[in-house]
Image: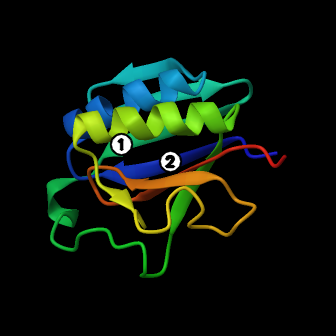
């Protein structure tokens, strides 16, 4: 069981704006908040975002380098994937693989793929039928 994951971000306020609505939609609740970080919790697992120190901002995140590629979340249903997709579009958030959406992961993988402010790929996957 995963206890928590901690991700350093380039702009904490932009990260909070992005992740707060999404994680709330998925059932997470804000868990902790301090000057340089915030976390949201779902059951026994939590996600932490921390403002990176300025001295480490010189090399931006890229999911194709060594390290985290993406975060994938369970959706309650295909309907929830569709609702989140609509909200992402309303917010002007970059949706990946639009030409294959919602089956970019394969014909039995109903999902939406998008990016957070640091271009971390996020995936929301509906349960299999």
User: How far across and how far down the image is residue 31, in percent?
Assistant: 52, 19
Which residue is label 1 attached to?
50
How far across and down, in percent of the image, does residue 51 sit? 28, 44
Q: Say which residue appears at 34% left-offset and 50% top-offset.
A: 116
Q: Report if the CB atoms under discs 2 and 1 are less than 8 Å apart.
A: yes
Q: In this view, does 41 lie to the left or right of 93?
A: right
Mark 2 and mark 1: span between their CA atoms?
A: 7 Å
Marks 2 and 1, the one that precedes in the sequence: 2
Residue 57 seen by the camera:
yes
Looking at the rendering, in which quadrant would you find the N terminus? top right
Which mark, by number, is residue 6? 2
Up the image or down, 6 lies above or below 55; here it is above
Q: Please tell me which residue is depicted at 28% across the width and 56% down the height of the picture.
A: 118
Location of residue 14 in the rendering, given as x and y in whole percent from the top left corner? 21, 38
Q: Residues within 10 Å of mark 2 (few under 14, many from 20)?
A: few
Q: For the point 50% across and 73% down, which residue is it?
A: 67
């Amino acid at each position: 069981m995963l206890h928590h994951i901690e991700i350093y971000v380039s702009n904490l306020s932009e990260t909070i704006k992005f992740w707060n609505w999404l994680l709330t939609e998925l059932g997470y609740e804000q868990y902790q908040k301090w000057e340089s970080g915030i976390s949201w919790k779902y059951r026994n697992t939590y996600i932490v975002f921390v403002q990176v120190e300025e001295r480490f901002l010189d090399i931006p995140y890229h999911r194709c380098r060594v390290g985290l590629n993406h975060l994938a979340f369970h959706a309650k249903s295909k309907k929830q994937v569709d609702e989140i997709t609509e909200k992402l579009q309303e917010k002007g958030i970059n949706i990946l693989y639009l030409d294959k959406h919602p089956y970019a992961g394969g014909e039995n993988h109903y999902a939406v793929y998008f990016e957070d402010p640091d271009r971390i790929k996020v995936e929301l996957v509906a349960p299999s039928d």
